[in-house]
Amino acid sequence: LEAKIQEALETLPEQCRLIFKMSRFEELKYHEIAAQLQLSVKTVENQMGKALKLMRTQLKDYLPLITILIGRLLEP
Amino acid sequence: MNEEMEHIEDLIGKFIVGEASETEIRELREWCAISPENQKYLDDTSLIYEKSQLPSKPEFDSEAAWAKVKGKISKKATKTRFMLPTWGIAAGLGLLFALSFVFYFYRQSTQTQEFQFVADNIVVTQQMPDLTEISLNQHSQVKVEYNERKNRGTIILEGEALISIPDSKKVNWMVQAGELQIEDIGTVFHVKAFPDSALVEVTVQEGLVRFFKEDMEGITLKAGEKGTYDKNLNVFSKLEADPNVSAFVTRAFTFQEEELGQVLEKLSQVYGKKIVMEGDISGCKLTVAFENEDLETILAIIAETLGLEIKEEADQIKLSGNGCF
């Protein structure tokens, strides 16, 4: 899964990827990212949301398996 | 709808990176509560965020590297192998093991258990898993089929037994003696059914039983009643219970104006000792009760009461006297 996530990350649009990386790996706050890139905080929020959505769409084939399996097992 | 979704996406992002305000967190929780899909949406996204890693060598140009290596690899080596990660194998094996364990115990509990025991020269008492007690008199045997899941217990009896079923009974018991059936309705009861005897006797001490045959309705017996079935006449009849019917287990006897001959026969059966009489004493009437005494004491009391003499011989005891008082 980690490898797939990395792949998905690399396919994100330029700005999305940059903001995601700054948030995730440099642990910057939205307003810090916004200041560095000279964007509004709202745009950073938007881009971050978009980045996560795109990645989830790409990874949807890998994600549900685990959750569904566990869900089934826990059902009475 | 799209706008709303976009708003949610933003909220999720903010929530994951820890920038969401109290109000936003509450809003997201409400959204998650709408459906399990929504919750999963958030969980998946969090997982992606958590699992994402920095590329180990960000500057590495894999295309170029691949091109460089490609030429050196022979066609054979391009076979792809799918390897399961080791933790996957471990988890799979673990799951398999756990499931077989559960399945094994499930099978165990659904299977019918069988017990079999025989009493030759002594009285044997056995307890079933549901605490039902079966006391077998001498020269008797039973086979028990017990299935707790189906709430069913069957006692296949040849001979004489006292059956005590506890109040907290888990299974419905049925006694089979040849073609005769005795269904318990919460009880202590006694069954005498020797295959070579024409008479089958059922005596109820507590509760209620139904005594019947597959093709005959039979009778219902209450506490203190005795039912008999005559194999030759094919008739069920109801009598008053013999109070000493379970003496072979309890060694408790109550004799009411009973003839000495009868009393000694009963004692002889229970204690497994031959008792003979000398003189005209067989018809002497006796009223007495014993509670778990040994045979010597009982005979001493009887002899005292009726003015008899006791003589112990090699394999028998002799009571002698000159008639009754």
Image (cartoon, rainbow, N blue to C red):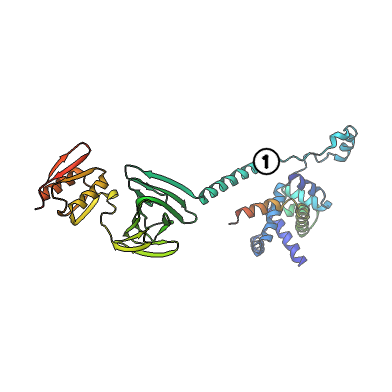
Q: Is residue B253 visible?
A: yes
Q: If the image is split into quadrants, where does the N terminus of chain B sit?
A: bottom right
For disc 1, the neighbor class at 10 Å (few under 14, some 14 to 19, many from 20) is: few
Q: How many marks?
A: 1
Q: Quadrant of residue B230?
A: bottom left
**Residue at the (89%, 32%) spot, across then down:** B72
Looking at the picture, which amino acid does disc 1 mark? Ile
Q: Is residue B19 visible?
A: no
Residue denoted by label 1: B89
Task: Residue B111: give x, y in percent of width and height.
Answer: 52, 50
**Residue at the (10%, 52%) spot, across then down:** B324
Task: Residue A3: give x, y in percent of width and height.
Answer: 76, 44
Q: Nearer the viewer, residue B30 or B294?
A: B294
The answer to whether B198 appears left or right of A46 in the picture is: left
**Residue at the (44%, 54%) spot, across then down:** B153
Residue extending furthest toward the bottom? B1
Task: Residue B74: give x, y in percent of width and height.
Answer: 88, 33
